[in-house]
Image (spheres, helix red, strand yellow):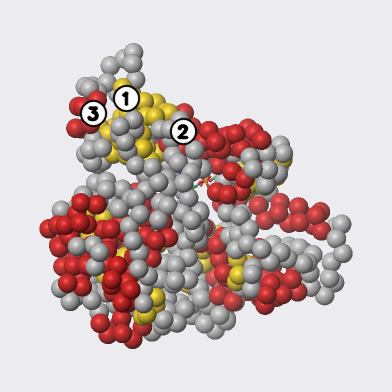
Amino acid sequence: MAGLATSFGSGAMSNSMDDVANFAQAMFVIGSNTTEQHPVFGTMLRRAVKNRGVKLIVADPRRIDLTDFATLHIRQKPGTDIALLNGIMYILLEKGWEDKKFIEERCEGFDEFKAMVMQYPPEKTSVITGVPVETLYRAAEIMGTVKPMAVMWAMGITQHIVGVRNVMTLANLQMLLGNMGLPGGGVNPLRGQNNVQGACDMGGLPNVYPAYQAVTNEEARKKFEASWGVPLPDKVGMTVTEVIPNILEGKTHALYILGEDPVMSDPDTTHIRKCLEAVDFLVLQEIFPSETSAYADVLLPGVSFAEKSGTFTNTERRVQMVRKAIEPLGEARPDWQITRELAVRLLESRALDPDAPYATWQYRDTTDIMVEINALTPSYSGITHARLEKGERLQWPCPNVEHPGTPILHVGKFSRGIGKFNPIDHIPPAELPDDDYPFVLSTGRVLYHWHGGQMTRRAKGLLAVYDQALIEVNPDDAAMLGLNGKKRVKVTSRRGQIEAEAWVTDRVPPGMVYANFHFPEASANELTIAALDPVAKIPEYKVCAVKVEIVNNQQM
Ligand SMILES: Nc1nc2c(c(=O)[nH]1)N[C@H]1C(S)=C(S)[C@@H](COP(=O)(O)OP(=O)(O)OC[C@H]3O[C@@H](n4cnc5c(=O)[nH]c(N)nc54)[C@H](O)[C@@H]3O)O[C@H]1N2
Ligand SMILES: Nc1nc2c(c(=O)[nH]1)N[C@H]1C(S)=C(S)[C@@H](COP(=O)(O)OP(=O)(O)OC[C@H]3O[C@@H](n4cnc5c(=O)[nH]c(N)nc54)[C@H](O)[C@@H]3O)O[C@H]1N2
Ligand SMILES: [Mo]
């Protein structure tokens, strides 16, 4: 799911969490349930509002907890963010609130961009988004008059067929307002997994080597071939959302899955099961028997974070040391050791270049691996275990051991030189409600559980507070459906159905239901659609069409 690179580079936060919390005068949170999904940063945002009077705008179809702290809650229809943002930028331009100096000196493509934004006058925007015209004006007034403003987003923005276009539109907004490269501003995608940033930085993507050096770049490829002593392919690979469906196309024959549970987390579970049944060979490296392990030919026992040492890189590009707290249990081993053993066995049959420094995978520990990272990953060259052990707080880029790290990106200049405005038009979601499937389903998480729930459903304390999937249903819809004290609902899409208890709440607007994918007996992914963003290949988890019915014969 990683790596929604924008014209700003890597898809990491441009600013630091501290910096946003201490210097932003306004904050715009769009498509991030920050207090539940990033509780530490969520607390920092709440504190900034309470202690410094920061103006907070939340744009989210749901009434999430953070809206209690907001100056303004914009409640757009799911999947209408581009129209919403273009509509707000229309007003910013109408009022002359754009940062003319920043646009003139640091950006290009303004005229075409402006022509597109002019297609979104407030009345039209209001029809597409369902947001009242007055709310659009109020949002523009705060954004246009309070500086600096930091923008934060998460999956509410990216998990759409227009995920990349949504991100580019937010970049347009921050360039228009001149909120780039300064404390308290910036474009700040909140990364999800503890080390998704590190995994992307290390080349865990189909198109790049470590530090986003393209596999298609001859010079970069030569460098890695010389270091690893093997010829390397020059073709961009497939994303995870392409690899699994390609099994049924005969294009994928074997899978080696490390720490993912696609039966729970990929869209359209029925289809995923079919694919996993059909694959010739599946190796799964896990810390628990997951829903996916039923399909595995070989299980390799990895270990949890508490049983291994190394580094994680967080959402603000900060590299942090993790130290082993307990010895691995049973036959389990740290993931890097398993991968090393596999590599050594595979390489035994190959003639290696004896001069290549990292050809033989002779790492004794993760410090040895970090030495290789320092040598091959320019943005990490100065980030050594020794410095981290001393307690230095390092954020990449950090090109040498004297360098203090980089808390804010794009100061004075963007990484691609000049910031580019892109004209972006609204495109509706792949599947919208109709007479047969009249509700919008959106999906995500709750505070108490983690994705497929393999870890959190094993924690008694968490189950005590949240022990089953709940589906958020608006009170008006509950009345219309005749729920009337009954609890269980059946939700059906074109791809599958689930039954679960309804949580009748005005957190969701009428016409929308919200489900999570934490429990196998009622996982939202039985319903979701595998429509992908054409660039990032991220699925549209946040919108599909469903019908909702009462389950018959239930006890009251
Ligand atoms: N407790 C807990 N914390 C987690 C995780 C977990 O599983 N459990 N997972 C981690 C991971 S990997 C990730 S990626 C993050 C995810 O963090 P978030 O992205 O914050 O979480 P989500 O629940 O996916 O949904 C985000 C918000 O998007 C809103 N939304 C839905 N549709 C739209 C839309 O069309 N437009 C906009 N603007 N908003 C919309 C939803 O109402 C929701 O409030 O959380 C991380 N933190
Ligand atoms: N409907 C819907 N689906 C979604 C989303 C959504 O918002 N809506 N969000 C998507 C997003 S953003 C994400 S990130 C994915 C997450 O989806 P996954 O990555 O599949 O989910 P996780 O539960 O984080 O991790 C998978 C497995 O890793 C194992 N594991 C944990 N630590 C380790 C370790 O150190 N080593 C090894 N080998 N295994 C380990 C756990 O036991 C777990 O079973 O879900 C995606 N799916
Ligand atoms: Mo994620």
Image-based side of 393 in relation to 240, left or right: left
Amino acid tagged 3: Ala
User: Circle 3 sits on which residue?
Assistant: 478
**Labels 3 and 2: the sequence-earlier one:** 3
* Disc sitting over residue 549 in the figure: 1
Please state which of the two labelled residues, at mark 1 or mark 2, is closer to the viewer.
2
Q: Where residue 478 sits: x, y (%)?
A: 23, 28
Residue 6 horizontal/vertical position (percent): 44, 67
Between disc 3 and disc 1, the foreground one is 1
Which numbered disc covers residue 495?
2
- Which quarter of the figure has residue 445? top left
Q: Relative to 475, is 448 on the left or the right?
A: right
- Residue 175 position (above or below residue 277): below
Tell me which numbered mark, 1 or 2, is placed earlier along the sequence.
2
Specify the amino acid type for callout 2.
Arg
The secondary element bearing badge 1 is classed as: strand
| Farthest-out residue, left | 134
For the residue labelled by badge 2, is the local secondary structure a helix, a strand or a loop?
loop
Q: Nearer the viewer, residue 274 or 343?
A: 274
Is residue 514 something one can see in this rendering? Answer: no
Q: Is residue 336 visible?
A: yes
Q: Residue at x 36, y 73 (%)?
A: 421
Label 2, residues with CA under 10 Å away: few <14, some 14-19, many ≥20: some
Q: Residue 154 carries which label?
A: none
Which badge, 3 or 1, comes first in the chain's sequence? Answer: 3
Q: Distance between the residues labelled 3 and 1?
A: 10 Å
Front label number (3 vs 2)? 2
Separation (CA) of disc 1 from disc 2 = 16 Å
